[in-house]
Image: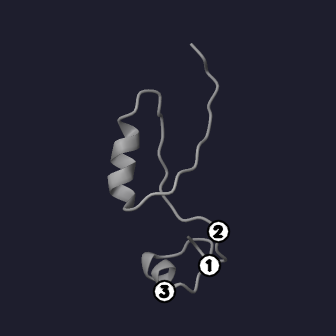
Amino acid sequence: MNSTLNFAYFAGGCFWCTEAIYLKIRGVVSVLPGYAGGHLANPTYEQVCSGDSGHT
């Protein structure tokens, strides 16, 4: 068995919908939804939607 972990980053829509789909893929051991970029360490949904946090 190959014990090497690989990482991939994907853009998607709703966190919960895409998370559920990726977790069903054989070999996927973890899914961590979140935002990319920006200047806030842990932005809220409202902060990201405002367009002021710099996240995508």
Residue type for callout 1 = Gly
Q: Quadrant of residue 5?
A: top right
Q: Counting other residues with Cα less than 10 Å from the Cα at mark 3, is it few (<14), some (14-19), or many (20 or more)?
A: few
- Residue at 57% across, 86% down: 52
Quadrant where the N terminus sits is top right
Gap in angstroms between the C-alphas marked 1 and 2: 7 Å
Q: Counting other residues with Cα less than 10 Å from the Cα at mark 2, is it few (<14), some (14-19), or many (20 or more)?
A: few
Of labels 3 and 2, earlier in sequence is 2
- Whole-percent x, y for residue 14 in the image: 36, 62
Residue type for callout 2 = Gly
CB contact under 8 Å: marks 1 and 3: no
54 left or right of 28 in image: right
Residue pointed to by mark 3:
50
Q: Is residue 33 above or below residue 28?
A: below
Gap in angstroms between the C-alphas marked 3 and 2: 15 Å
- Residue at 51% across, 57% down: 11
Asked whether 12 or 31 is in front, the reply is: 12
Q: Counting other residues with Cα less than 10 Å from the Cα at mark 1, is it few (<14), some (14-19), or many (20 or more)?
A: some
Residue pointed to by mark 2:
37
Residue type for callout 3 = Ser
CB contact under 8 Å: marks 1 and 2: yes
- Residue at 47% across, 76% down: 44
Q: Is residue 32 above or below residue 45?
A: above
- Tell me, what colour scheme is on the image? one colour
Disc on res. 54: 1
- Whole-percent x, y for residue 37 in the image: 64, 68
Asked whether 12 or 26 is in front, the reply is: 12
Gap in angstroms between the C-alphas marked 1 and 3: 9 Å
Q: Quadrant of residue 40?
A: bottom right
Of labels 1 and 2, earlier in sequence is 2
